[in-house]
Amino acid sequence: MKPRRALITGGASGFGLSTAKALLAQGAQVAIADIDEEKLHAAAEELNNDQILPLRLDVTSPASVQQTVTACDKRFGGLDALVNSAGVIHFGPLEETTEADWDRVIDIDLKGVFLCCQAAAPLLRQSGQRGRIVNIGSDVSKIGCALIASYCAAKFGVVGLTKALAGELAPDGVTVNCVCPIGVSTTGMGQDVLAYKHQTTGANNEAILDATAADIPLGRNPTQGDIVNAILFFLAEESSFLTGVALDVDGGLLSTSTLPGFGDGQ
Ligand SMILES: NC(=O)c1ccc[n+]([C@@H]2O[C@H](COP(=O)([O-])OP(=O)(O)OC[C@H]3O[C@@H](n4cnc5c(N)ncnc54)[C@H](O)[C@@H]3O)[C@@H](O)[C@H]2O)c1
């Protein structure tokens, strides 16, 4: 039982677009919805598939979200899966983060997930045992991180929202799970993170990526495929008894440690 009809927010880029490609290859009908119309157009051209539905969406606008869900219903005759991948990040010290910076991140990364889940819920409930929501959290959904307070707060919120909605939608068989990746440098946001690290440390991209790989117990940086595989797992029939899960896709980063002062323990 593959999801037949999926809506992916942030679907014009990064994890959203990679997930759309994988679902299309499984024979699904996929709406890619994004605020960036240029990227959306380019993505639709690249996918070049009549099962794709590109939609302009602003996840912070209840009207835009409802229009998007209605367009999916009209085209697909229902909806089996929602992947909430739209997101932005803001970097900066607490004292330099403005209220507008804070609101933008919380509105897109947390309120946007709420609005999309709320609007899609009636169609997903109708889909029943096939119904799936997959939210994208982060490693900073579970551990604090300096200089990205608004992003960290939003992503902690996404895990809480995931668990709350898992309980609400369970009676209809709909599962709600969250994938929590560490940084993947090839996406739009991954490039933003690299640029910020370069700006603050002066190190080049290769040195930055070598340093992050060295910190990861499995010894390498993740690929987009590592993250998409976890998203596909939560969309698949095989995960139908899992709900309310926030899965770390982090090469062991948050799960392992050595004794303090013990180096890498080798
Ligand atoms: N790449 C990483 O390192 C990383 C790590 C952990 C979590 N994430 C999360 O993964 C998700 C996908 O990010 P990505 O890395 O693929 O980055 P990305 O920039 O490639 O994709 C994000 C997409 O969201 C869209 N978007 C932004 N605001 C929107 C809005 N208001 N309405 C609709 N769409 C909007 C952007 O236009 C973009 O296409 C995000 O939630 C991000 O927080 C990314």
Image (cartoon, rainbow, N blue to C red):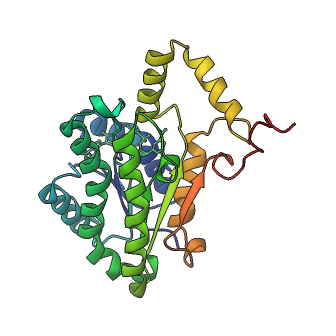
Quarter occupied by residue 84: bottom left
Residue 5 visible in the shown view:
no
Quarter occupied by residue 171: bottom left
Image spot of residue 126 (x, y percent): 32, 82
Is 97 situated above or below 62? Answer: above
Q: Residue furthest front?
A: 261
Q: Write the residue at 26% across / 77% down.
A: 122
Q: Write the residue at 57% across / 63% down.
A: 233
Is 244 situated above or below 139? Answer: below
User: On the picture, is 9 further left or further right than 17?
Assistant: left
Viewer-proximal residue among 79 and 256: 256
Q: Residue furthest right?
A: 266
Answer with the quadrant where ligand 1 appears in the image.
Answer: top left
Viewer-proximal residue among 134 and 81: 134
Point out the image quarter for the C terminus: top right
Residue 94 visible in the shown view:
yes
Image spot of residue 227 (x, y percent): 55, 49
Viewer-proximal residue among 26 and 201: 201
Image spot of residue 240 (x, y percent): 54, 76
User: On the picture, is 190 further left or further right than 75?
Assistant: right
Q: Residue furthest left?
A: 63
